[in-house]
Amino acid sequence: MTHHLVIDAGNTRIKFAHFIGDALHDSFIWDPFVEEGLNQFLTAKHFDKIVLSDVSGNALAKLQTYFKQEILLLGPQLQLPFANLYATPNTLGADRLALVAGAMAKYPEANCLIIDAGTCVTYDVLRADATFLGGNITPGLQMRLKAMNSFTGKLPLPEFSFPEKVLGTQTSECLVSGAYYGLIGEIEWLVQTYAQEFPALKTILTGGDAQLLAKRLKTNIFAEPQLLLYGLNKIASIND
């Protein structure tokens, strides 16, 4: 049975996951600014392969001090489990590649729309014949709020709290409700639009704001908080 270590390096934290075969064995979230706990997580573990998705762009050099074996950096140079029809593959983020591979691992031979709700919201379409077609990128919740504050003279930057009602009765409520329910409407419309083109479309929601958005989405979704990690493991399994 293969042992893979997959690493998801974000802008503030790094997530490690140990897979045995196709099963997630254990995981660890590491704050590199604190630098505690990683050695303990790695103790007595042997990995056949290590694969890294690094959206921060500066994790590889730091991580190589912890490992003697090669770390495979996810990018267009690695073999992927799907055909990539993206017109500019060199500009496609490693996290999006991993999410599409994760959808393949979880929902093989299905039309999939993968929605990653983070700083930006990405929408990626995987066709049932294992072909990645592309998608959309839009501002995430906090980006919407910050943009309205930054590009106006008087609008405040409110602290986000879940808007129970659509109608805001003061400016901060209007901003939060507009950002939140505007994103809900965007997601619903895109899901409906893609579903008309791709039969039996499976909509997969992941990312930091996934749970918050799932509270109000009417569409049938599959919540997969660990989707990216499963995708990295899928990629690790096909790269020698």
Image: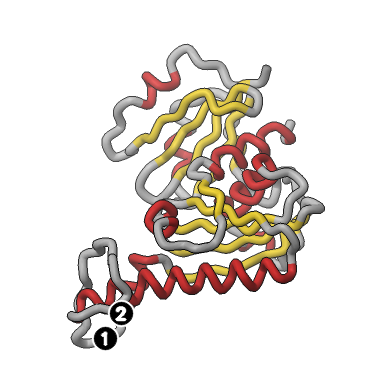
The N terminus - image quarter: top right
Q: Residue at x 29, y 40 (%)?
A: 33
Indicate which disc residue 108 carries: none
- Write down the residue under mark 2: 148
Q: Residue at x 30, y 83 (%)?
A: 151
Q: Residue at x 21, y 87 (%)?
A: 153
Indicate which disc residue 152 carries: 1
Q: Position of residue 27 (x, y in %)?
A: 45, 29
Does 199 appear above or below 186?
A: above
In the visual, does 148 lie left or right of 102? left
**Mark 1 belongs to which amino acid?**
Thr
Q: Residues within 10 Å of mark 2 (few under 14, many from 20)?
A: some
**Is 9 in front, or is 216?**
216
Q: Position of residue 127 (x, y in %)?
A: 75, 57
**Is 212 in front, or is 94?**
212
Q: SS at mark 1?
A: loop
Q: What is the basis of the colouring in this image?
A: secondary structure
In the visual, does 107 lie left or right of 163? right
- Measured in 3D between alpha carbons, the distance from the residue under mark 1 to the one under mark 2, in whole angstroms, is 6 Å
Q: SS at mark 2?
A: helix
Q: Position of residue 66 (x, y in %)?
A: 45, 26
In the visual, does 17 lie left or right of 174? right
Outermost residue, right direction?
A: 129
Outermost residue, top direction?
A: 44
In the visual, does 181 lie left or right of 133? left
**Mark 2 belongs to which amino acid?**
Met
Q: Position of residue 149 (x, y in %)?
A: 26, 78
Q: Quadrant of residue 133?
A: bottom right
Q: Are marks 1 and 2 in contact (CB under 8 Å)?
A: yes
